[in-house]
Image: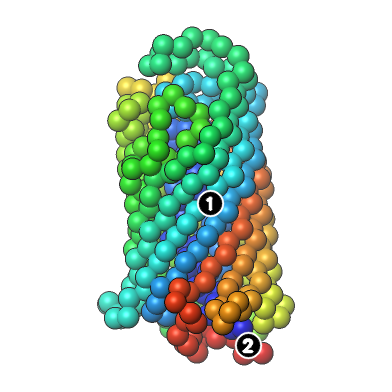
């Protein structure tokens, strides 16, 4: 039997892998450590001790039209279209010993992929010696900044909750002046809390997560991005022991202005609400439980950001063979 703890592993791995950067207006290049809907089903559950691996494939398409401007790599652009195809690889270790009465885990993530960015107009790029021009395009395979995370989680019957922090380290393949970048080239921290109420008898999961993203300055462009609040909500129902479906919502609100000597677009603050759905399917491959999940969200209420569609396909499994038995509150009973 495939049990619910496999999904718990997926929810946890998604929680610590909040590193996808979707270009938008607000923070520099619109790159944010937070992706709407990433912390969804079972977000508050930390799985049993062991090693876990997760691969998240992101597909994003969006546009910023109407003459609105965005600054990427020191260049100010308008009429921007964005397409991203990227993988986010995450390895996690849940410690065998408890801390403060809860399970503790650490993880590391690495993004890689191909952002495709095109702009109808390049308004200015003084640091690069460029003037007004039309039709700028860039697409290349790049590495993003690695992200390290820590989390601590507790259980009380059907209720599960966790606290954590992630840090994006500016060590990726950033190039000033290039439109195609996954790296932020700045320190980014994210403090978050998540909670899940899960009833294994009826297979119903109610989950939510809140967080604060704290941005540093890009030393190459002298651009300091503002900080942002974010919120995720998810309702999921098991249809069978293998299949579950649900609805998702994500909210992002930049609470402080961009600034710095290199900022040429003013104190913009971005905001977006995204809604969508998820589907999860559990299988066993060569004796190892594997959880797959598809999420699709549409950005519906947008300010100072492009409007687009987010697709996220995740595959997660324990490393080294079958994971240890689940605790009773996590195991499904069908």
Residue on which disc 1 sits: 87
Count numbered badges in the picture: 2
- Helix, strand or loop at label 1? It is strand
The disc, 2 or 1, on the residue closer to the chain's N-terminal end is 2
Would residue 13 appear left or right of 205 to someone viewing this image? left
Residue 1 marker? 2
Q: Which of the two residues, 183 or 245, is positioned nearer the viewer here?
A: 183
Residue 127, by quadrant, is: top left
Q: Is residue 322 above or below residue 106?
A: below
Location of the N terminus by quadrant is: bottom right
Q: Is residue 46 above or below residue 128?
A: below
Q: Position of residue 58 (x, y in %)?
A: 58, 50
Q: Residue at x 49, y 46 (%)?
A: 112
Q: Is residue 158 above or below residue 185?
A: below
Q: Residue at x 59, y 71 (%)?
A: 291
Would residue 247 appear left or right of 255 to someone viewing this image? right
Question: How many C-alpha atoms fall within 10 Å of the one at disc 1: few (<14), some, or many (≥20)?
Answer: many
């Amino acid at each position: 039997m495939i049990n619910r703890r496999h999904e718990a592993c997926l929810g946890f791995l998604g929680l610590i892998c909040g590193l996808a950067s979707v270009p938008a207006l607000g923070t520099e290049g619109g790159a944010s450590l937070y992706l709407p809907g990433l912390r969804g089903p079972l977000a508050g559950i930390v799985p049993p001790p062991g090693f876990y691996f997760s691969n998240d494939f992101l597909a994003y398409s969006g546009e910023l039209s109407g003459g609105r401007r965005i600054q990427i790599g020191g260049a100010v652009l308008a009429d921007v279209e964005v397409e991203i195809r990227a993988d986010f690889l995450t390895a996690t270790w849940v410690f065998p010993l408890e801390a403060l009465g809860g399970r503790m885990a650490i993880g590391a993530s690495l993004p890689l992929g191909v952002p495709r960015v095109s702009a109808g107009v390049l308004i200015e790029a003084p640091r690069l010696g460029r003037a007004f021009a039309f039709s700028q395009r860039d697409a290349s395979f790049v590495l993003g900044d690695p992200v390290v995370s820590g989390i601590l989680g507790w259980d009380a019957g059907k209720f599960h909750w966790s606290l954590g922090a992630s840090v994006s380290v500016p060590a990726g393949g950033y190039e000033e002046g290039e439109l195609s970048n996954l790296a932020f080239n700045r320190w980014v921290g994210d403090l978050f809390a998540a909670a899940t109420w899960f009833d294994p008898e009826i297979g119903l999961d109610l989950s939510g997560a809140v967080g604060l993203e704290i941005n540093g300055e890009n030393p190459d462009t002298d651009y300091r991005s503002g900080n942002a609040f974010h919120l995720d909500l998810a309702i999921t129902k098991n249809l069978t022991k293998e299949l579950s479906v649900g609805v998702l919502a994500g909210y992002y609100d930049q609470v402080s202005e961009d600034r710095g000597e290199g900022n040429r677009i003013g104190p913009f603050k971005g905001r977006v609400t995204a809604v969508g759905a998820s589907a999860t399917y559990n299988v066993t491959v060569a004796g190892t439980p594997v959880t797959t999940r598809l999420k699709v969200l549409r950005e519906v209420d947008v300010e100072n950001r492009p409007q687009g569609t987010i697709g996220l396909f995740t595959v997660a499994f324990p490393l080294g063979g079958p994971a240890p038995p689940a605790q009773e509150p996590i195991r499904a009973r069908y």
